[in-house]
Amino acid sequence: MSFQAQMNKNLKPGHLLIAEDIVAYKKKTLRIEMILNIGLIAVEYLLYILSFLLLFHYKVATDYGAIDWRNLIDSLQQIPVTAEYALLLGIIFTIYTGTLYQRGMFKWSRDIKIIDDSFTASKAIAISFLIALGIIFFLKTSIVYSRVLILVLAILMVCCFVLSRLMRYGVLVALRKTRHYNKNVLIIGAGRIGEQIRDNLNANKTSSSRFIGFLDDYKTGKEVLGTIPQIEKLVQKHKIHEIYITIPSERGVINSLIASVRKYDVQIKIIPELFELVTSSVSFDHAFDYPCIEIVRTPLRGINWFMKRSADFILSALGVILIAPLLVFIAVCIKLDSKGPIIIKQKRIGKNGAPFHMLKFRSMVANAEALKASLQTKNEADGPVFKIKNDPRITRVGRFIRKYSLDELPQLFNVLFGQMSLIGPRPPLPNEVEQYSDYQWRRFDVRPGITGLWQVSGRSDLPFEEWVKLDIYYIERWSLSMELKILLKTIPVVLKGEGAY
């Protein structure tokens, strides 16, 4: 029996009435979304306006008499500069709202990430204020705007945005707990990708999507509701909102499946067949009028690369200046403790496999490399890495500076020279790289770092494969907020001295 014949066999005579029932159910959930979304956006902008009015009252209105809050509109009309400030605020709001809308910040279905969203809003606020001030400058208004008001308003808008995101998060968490509002999700294919989507749906605290089950022609289990030809019956029964298709190679089956459920106004999402390669590092484009997915190495390119490199240069230069006395003190201690150079140059592999000499304070005896061969049997690390917790080659001063990562401070000069970054994958030794697989070579897509996810997630206690996974996760999902998180987490990890040897 053909796929379409099996589909027709599953149809009920009254399927049009059922389709109408599904549409009515979807309309109800969409109505709830729209009301709540408009309400939350209104509250957010009321907070912005209230912040402006309070600043206007204390920094501007006092020169013309106090604002009568009981008769606010008439009171504001009596102040001669109200129109100019209203114009400034209107321009700011227009640009700011357009930027947030373009970034999808007002979408109800958008995952809430407080830190990432706050960075996006901060950039939108900075852009909108700069453009608004530029426009006002060319309009040649007759007043001088309060610089304190403008600066504090920008800061308060960021605070109000964070507060509104927390409110939205709370509303979504509360909605998820109720059965009166759910978006039912069906997954086609109970393989590994389908299971990962299910796990993500169940783990998301703010998503209204509720996993209903799988459809699979070859697998059975308590979560497998049936085979693919039964899809119409299950869409009707469970009032499905979204369908995820994870078997894109079955083109004939998918075409018939889409045609059969299209009448129900179900949202259909197809996971690309190149899922193993197509993670977050993709760019959607057109090639000769055909849609295509371009696989890119990392989001760390273009303006992102420029911002990271600028931050690396400025912060490393400041770091060298500020800790110069500490560098001199450590150098003296190393010289008094044991014979040998103060700073050693280790050959390491950097971006795109290019070798460079990494600078470190010497923490071992002068002939440490010669003794390494005799200690190979005591290696406690897995993979192409050599680590011993109580390495006999480490000096007294070396053990202390290693524990608190002070031996790595000279690497600030590597950052200045552009060979390393403040944050990135751990720079490996050449003999380690010789044992790398193709997958592990992905660590060289960006500059190596002084610290990174590996540093704040266990340091030397991590197995090698975990190092690789953390490095590739960082490379594929790079963002400014991730950089800030790693920097902030590095401080307590280094101070505790855990996992370093």
Image (cartoon, rainbow, N blue to C red):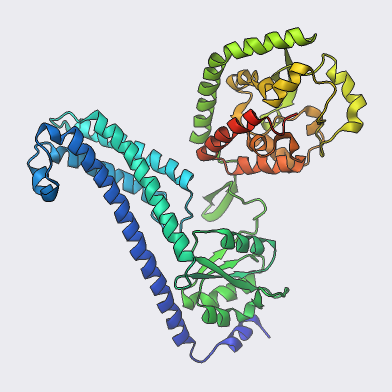
Q: Quick check: 366 left or right of 345? A: right
Q: Position of residue 142 (x, y in %)?
A: 12, 30
Q: Quadrant of residue 4?
A: bottom right
Relative to 312, residue 482 above or below: below
In the rendered image, the residue lying farthest to the bottom is 13
Q: Quick check: 231 left or right of 264? A: right
Can see residue 356? no
Instruction: Name the residue rendered at 20%, 33% in the picture.
Output: 59
Q: Position of residue 155 (x, y in %)?
A: 34, 37
Instruction: Name the residue rendered at 77%, 28% in the picture.
Output: 429
Instruction: Name the residue rendered at 50%, 77% in the picture.
Output: 239
Q: Position of residue 367 (x, y in %)?
A: 85, 15
Relative to 371, residue 7 above or below: below
Q: 390 or 296: which is nearer to us? A: 390
Q: Position of residue 161 (x, y in %)?
A: 37, 46
Q: Quick check: 222 left or right of 42? A: right
Count of all numbered marks drawn on residues in the image: 0
Relative to 455, residue 242 above or below: below
Quadrant occupied by the C terminus:
top right
Q: Quadrant of residue 298?
A: top right
Quadrant occupied by the N terminus:
bottom right
Q: Quick check: 134 left or right of 389? A: left
Q: Quadrant of residue 8?
A: bottom right
Can see residue 67? yes
